């Protein structure tokens, strides 16, 4: 059997693409004579019953490499997840959720606009509630689709694609407790105009990064939040993009804006991004 297929069948990788990354990190298999042989290519054939050894199994800890991103951000910021009620915005396969659970979260509610994407190991965990077909941008305080929304969440994490984070934030920050905090992934290709993004969605011009940071910081500040950290993601995006994390909290309970005002803030952030692109001839 192909080694990448065998890794998936054994549950050592959630997908063939993840298996191939494990192979790149180093995989060995035990031959009939007891000696170990290194895997060279993804298509290398090995006996189905062969013993395997992963030389670098970091990516196998979570159902997707997103878990490694969040793990690094949690370590860098010192956020303690143990016992917290968490919200995962843009749950997708469930890498962030997996990371939260492994760090002791009491409950994770995940929302995603898509359907049937969450890994079975995550969706079947009794600590997890998966809410599909929900556009986070349209959420409001106390939204009935979110269990105990008025109770709020201790920690909000998120990884959204094909939309600026600044457009999503107004719909979700109100779900945080007054003492809660957020730790969100920022993908540069979705914070710029199409003309500023290279082939394959790669942002090669790092002179755009200060604008992206300012855009996200401004959106959070105008929503009444205090940005406490801006940091590099510990690993690049799957497409190779340099990604970031932003951490923020409420400076005081009275800082929460009405939902209508939050929508205005998001609209102004979007206009600012378009003005920046126009000013730079994109």
Image (cartoon, rainbow, N blue to C red):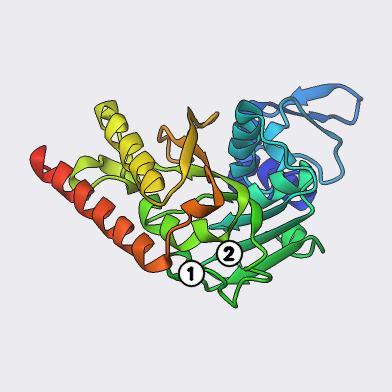
Outermost residue on the top side: it is 35
Where is residue 247? Give x, y as percent.
Answer: 52, 38
> Residue 139 shows which numbered tag?
1
Where is residue 220? Give x, y as percent.
Answer: 41, 46
Q: Residues within 10 Å of mark 2 (few under 14, many from 20)?
A: many
User: Going 82% across and 64% down the picture, which residue do you hit?
Assistant: 126
Where is residue 14? Give x, y as percent.
Answer: 68, 50
Residue 109 vertical placement versus 202 (above, below): below
Question: Does the rendering let one see residue 82?
Answer: yes
> Residue 164 shows which numbered tag?
none
Write down the quadrant of residue 111 in the picture: bottom right
Camera-nearest residue between 25 and 69: 69
Outermost residue on the bottom side: it is 144
Q: Quadrant of the image for the C terminus?
A: top left
User: Going 52% across and 60% down the picture, which residue do you hit?
Assistant: 174
Q: Which residue is mark 2?
A: 111
Q: Is residue 211 left or right of residue 114?
A: left
Q: CA distance from mark 1 to mark 2?
A: 11 Å
Disc with the residue nearer the chain's start (1 vs 2)? 2
Question: Does the rendering let one see residue 43?
Answer: no
Camera-nearest residue between 29 and 206: 206
Helix, strand or loop at label 1? It is loop
Where is residue 72? Give x, y as percent.
Answer: 62, 31
Callout 1 touching callout 2 (CB < 8 Å):
yes
């Amino acid at each position: 059997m192909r080694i990448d297929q065998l890794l998936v069948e054994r549950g050592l990788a959630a997908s063939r693409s993840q298996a191939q990354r494990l192979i790149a990190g180093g995989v060995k298999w035990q031959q009939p004579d007891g000696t170990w042989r290194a895997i060279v290519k993804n298509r290398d054939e090995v006996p189905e019953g062969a013993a395997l050894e992963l030389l670098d199994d970091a990516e196998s800890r979570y159902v997707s490499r997103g878990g490694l991103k969040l793990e690094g951000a949690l370590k860098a910021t010192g956020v303690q997840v143990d016992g917290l009620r968490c919200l995962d915005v843009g749950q997708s396969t469930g890498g962030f959720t997996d990371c939260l659970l492994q760090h002791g979260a009491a409950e994770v509610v995940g929302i995603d606009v898509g359907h049937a994407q969450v890994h079975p190991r995550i969706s079947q965990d009794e600590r997890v509630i998966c809410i599909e077909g929900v556009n986070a941008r349209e959420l409001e305080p106390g939204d009935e689709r979110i269990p105990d929304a008025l109770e709020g969440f201790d920690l909000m994490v998120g990884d959204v694609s094909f939309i600026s984070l600044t457009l999503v934030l107004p719909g979700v920050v109100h779900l945080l407790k007054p003492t809660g905090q957020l730790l969100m992934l920022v993908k540069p290709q979705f914070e710029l105009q199409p003309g500023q993004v290279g082939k394959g969605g790669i942002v090669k011009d790092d002179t755009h990064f200060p604008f992206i940071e300012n855009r996200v910081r401004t959106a959070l500040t105008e929503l009444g939040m205090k940005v406490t950290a801006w940091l590099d993601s510990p690993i690049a995006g799957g497409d190779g993009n340099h990604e970031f994390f932003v951490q923020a909290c409420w400076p005081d309970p009275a800082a929460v804006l009405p939902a209508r005002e939050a929508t205005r803030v998001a609209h102004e952030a979007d206009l600012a991004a378009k003005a920046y692109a126009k000013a730079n001839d994109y």
